[in-house]
């Protein structure tokens, strides 16, 4: 989230994140988190891509090369693009073979488990990856 020398910022971000997670749970809004490397890989094909590379790929994905965007804006767009991409992959696996047993069904179940972490207090399909 933030550099260690900015402990006040880290604490404030932690509080804001906690409130967002609580609000999502109370309103039964699905909450899915992805690691930065997973988002970078989904958008650029490389998990160790730089912010510049992510920004360029986001611009290509949406067909607009606006260099005035901040890295925060391109990170947010990259997250949205990655989420749509990963949901499509998961749904394609489910529609191709269902959730049955066998290798194909196991792949679909693995994709689904990567998107959420089991939590008995949350409704089905809602998860917080820690």
Image: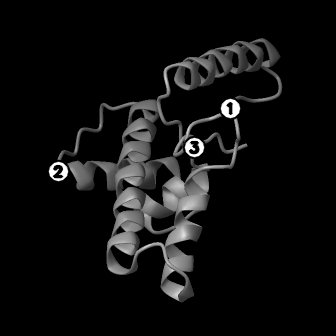
Q: Position of residue 7 (x, y in %)?
A: 81, 18
Query: From the viewer's perspective, is residue 25 above or below residue 98?
Result: above
Q: CA distance from mark 2 to mark 3?
A: 26 Å
Name the one closer to the observer, 60 or 33: 33
Image quarter hosting the C terminus? top right
Which residue does the numbered mark 3 point to in the structure image?
33
| Picture coordinates of residue 119, whole percent (x, y) | 70, 42
**Quadrant in which residue 1 is drawn:** top right
Please name whichever residue, 118 or 70, is drawn nearer the observer in this view of the structure: 118
Residue for point 75% across, 30% down:
3
Q: Quadrant of residue 48 in the image?
A: bottom right
SS at badge 1: loop
Please rate how many residues cluster around mark 1, counting C-alpha atoms within 10 Å: few if below 14, some from 14 to 19, many from 20. Answer: few
Query: In terms of sequence position, does the residue under pointer 1 or pointer 3 come before the other?
Result: 1
Q: Say which mark, if any, is on residue 63.
A: 2
- Residue at 45 percent across and 69 percent down: it is 45
> Dot 1 corresponds to which residue?
1
Q: Which residue extends farthest bottom?
A: 102
- The earlier-in-sequence mark between 2 and 1 is 1
Q: Position of residue 107 (x, y in %)?
A: 53, 77
What residue lies at 24% left-to-right and 38% top-to-bottom?
A: 66
Task: Assess disc 3: are there few (<14), some (14-19) or many (≥20) residues with their C-alpha within 10 Å of its C-alpha.
Answer: some
């Amino acid at each position: 989230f933030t550099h260690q020398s900015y402990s006040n910022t880290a604490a404030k971000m932690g509080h804001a994140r906690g409130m967002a997670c609580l609000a999502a749970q109370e309103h039964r809004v699905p909450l899915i988190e992805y690691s930065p490397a997973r988002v970078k890989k989904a958008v650029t094909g490389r998990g160790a891509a730089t912010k510049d590379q992510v920004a360029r790929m986001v611009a290509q994905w949406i067909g607009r090369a606006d260099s005035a965007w901040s890295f925060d804006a391109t990170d947010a767009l990259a997250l949205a693009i990655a989420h749509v991409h990963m949901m499509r992959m998961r749904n394609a696996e489910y529609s191709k073979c269902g959730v049955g047993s066998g290798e194909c069904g196991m792949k679909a179940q693995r994709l689904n488990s990567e998107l959420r972490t089991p939590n008995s207090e949350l409704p089905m399909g809602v998860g917080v990856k820690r």
